[in-house]
Amino acid sequence: MQAFRSRNKAGRATGRMTLKDVAVRAEVSLITASRALRGVGRVSPELAERVKEAAAALNYVPDPAARALASSHSMAVTVLVPTLNNPATGDLLEAVHAVLQDAGFQVLIGDTHYSREQEERLLRNYLSHRPRGLIVTGFDRSEESRGLIAGSGIPCVHVLELANTPGVYCVGFDQAKAGETMTRYLLEKGHRRIAFGAVIDPRSMLRAEGYRRAAKAAGTYDPGLEFLRAGYASIRMGAEIFAEAIERRPDIDAMFFSNDDLAHGALFTALRRGIQVPEQIAIAGFNNLEEGAYTVPPLTTIHTSRAGIGRRAAQMLLTLMRGEEVAEPVVDVGYELIVRESA
């Protein structure tokens, strides 16, 4: 008992209880204590319970950095997203977290703010801690960031976009084709002066490519009908873009927004100004956020499976981290046109 008190005192001197303190209190070896707390290896239920009781009594918190140093493997996975200020991002992250947490991994989230420079800084920081895996958004990044990812040797999965490049793993859908699908639908409804509203980010610009492709094929493309702004998608931004569009181009008969938040702002503005939707102007969005089913009128949009993308990406990453072959390196989850009353 005296030996335990001496070691325990040493542990407290560092300000943190150690695994050795737990092992001494539970009267087991260091390796048994480690296996019991991690739930791996052959440890009898009696010993495992004794170790857990000792850890609880000492308020022991595992040190992930020490564990990674000892095993040369971290239990962390880094996920880089362009913004946390978007419900669609939250859906994806929730799914990623659920899959990886169940597998015993810690998810570290980085917000790049749609900045290549910020993404590069985050990569340098996170990769220095040697995470087990990496999930990044899309393919629009600096050459420095590409080099950091490739040179790290860490398994990486890209989400929300697709690329048929050897050695690249991705889960997403064809953003440009989805934008084209919505524009074609509006054209088929008889609209010919279709405006496009968006904030300038990589996925929105891919949707813009689809919008242009469909409009050009129909002979209706007019660059003056594009209303693009820097910043973040929001209801306020959508209201501002819509107000600008109808003032500059009162002949508009439909408007396709690259994001549901923007479309919601347009619907609120139309309602406030007495503009009939879709009789005077049809309004469509993208992402199928839950609120869109309850706007006035309900929003026509493109449904994207953010949770499905997150789940499949996390499962693919687990396969890569186990050193196993991925049967399907490019997973296209598709999208769906949701027709409601706004268009």
Image (tube, rainbow, N blue to C red):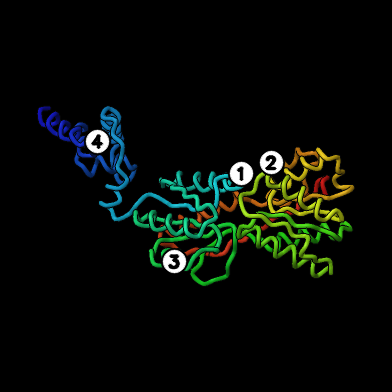
Residue at disc 2, secondary structure? helix
Nearer to us of marks 1 and 2 is 1
Q: From mark 2 to mark 3, how far is it between C-alphas?
A: 38 Å
For disc 4, the neighbor class at 10 Å (few under 14, some 14 to 19, many from 20) is some
Q: Are marks 1 and 4 in contact (CB under 8 Å)?
A: no
Residue marked by disc 2: 290
Image spot of residue 36 (x, y percent)? 29, 40
Kind of residue at disc 4: Arg
**Which sits earlier in the primary sequence, circle 3 or circle 1?**
1
Q: Which residue is mark 4?
A: 16
Q: Closer to the N terminus: mark 3 or mark 4?
A: 4
Residue closest to the eye, 88 or 221: 221
Residue 121: in sight, yes or no? yes
Residue type marked 3:
Glu
Q: Position of residue 212 (x, y in %)?
A: 75, 65
Q: Secondary structure at mark 3?
A: helix
Q: Are marks 1 and 2 in contact (CB under 8 Å)?
A: yes
N-terminal of the pair, mark 2 or mark 4, is 4
Earlier sequence position, callout 1 versus callout 2? 1
